[in-house]
Image (tube, helix red, strand yellow):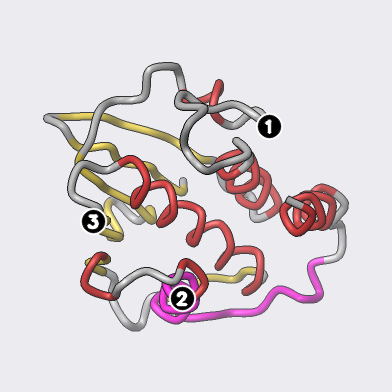
């Protein structure tokens, strides 16, 4: 919890983008998988190896790690697919649709299931990191598949 609050403070106070650099998206995803400590076969990656992003490696990796964590907790098969669709980074998993609109979940300390091992900060942190990168978090649901989008 202390680490999450420290990251939130870092993200919300970031004005200086001097730590940003160009990274391959697959390298950031690879770092996020390591951080999430999930089995590699639980994550399918459909991203061009040459695709790059200008970002804070540490923050963007944390955002992707949080998306992986959520997929592992809430998917019916404990699997996530990470793809580039329509020029946006997408995270897809099988499962139930969100019970509330996305804006509910990007508020701190909100979650649907209090029994899950979580403080309700994951999507709040993702949204804050994306805002620092000039992006937004979006969600779609179709035929049993949740798709979270870094747009």
Looking at the image, residue 1 lies above or below residue 27:
above
**In the structure shown, which secondary structural element does the residue marked by tag 2 occupy?**
strand
Disc 3/disc 1 C-alpha distance (Å): 25 Å
Residue 41, image x, y percentages: 21, 72
Q: Are marks 3 and 2 in contact (CB under 8 Å)?
A: no
Mark 1 vs mark 2: which is more N-terminal? 2
Q: Are marks 1 and 2 in contact (CB under 8 Å)?
A: no
Residue 126, image x, y percentages: 58, 48
Residue 140, image x, y percentages: 31, 31
Name the residue that disc number 3 marks: 79
User: How many labels sit on residues?
Assistant: 3
Q: Are marks 3 and 1 in contact (CB under 8 Å)?
A: no
* In the image: residue 128, left or right of residue 35: right
**In the structure shown, which secondary structural element does the residue marked by tag 3 occupy?**
loop
Residue positioned 15% across, 32% down in the render: 144
Mark 3 vs mark 2: which is more N-terminal? 2
Residue 13, image x, y percentages: 87, 52
Name the residue that disc number 2 marks: 52
Q: Nearer the viewer, mark 1 or mark 2?
A: 1
* In the image: residue 43, left or right of residue 21: left
């Amino acid at each position: 919890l202390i680490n999450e609050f420290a990251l939130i403070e870092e993200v919300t106070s970031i004005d200086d983008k001097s730590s940003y650099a160009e990274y391959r998206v697959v390298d950031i995803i690879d770092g996020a998988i390591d951080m999430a400590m999930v089995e590699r076969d639980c994550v399918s990656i459909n991203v061009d190896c040459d695709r790059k992003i200008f970002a804070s490696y540490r923050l963007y990796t944390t955002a992707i790690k949080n998306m992986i964590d959520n997929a592992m907790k809430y998917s019916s098969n404990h699997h996530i697919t990470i793809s580039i669709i329509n020029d946006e980074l997408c995270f897809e998993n099988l499962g139930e649709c969100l019970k509330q609109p996305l804006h509910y979940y990007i508020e701190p300390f909100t979650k649907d299931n209090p029994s899950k091992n979580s403080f309700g900060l994951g999507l709040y942190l993702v949204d804050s990191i994306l805002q620092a990168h000039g992006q937004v978090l979006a969600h779609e649901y179709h035929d049993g598949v949740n798709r979270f989008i870094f747009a």
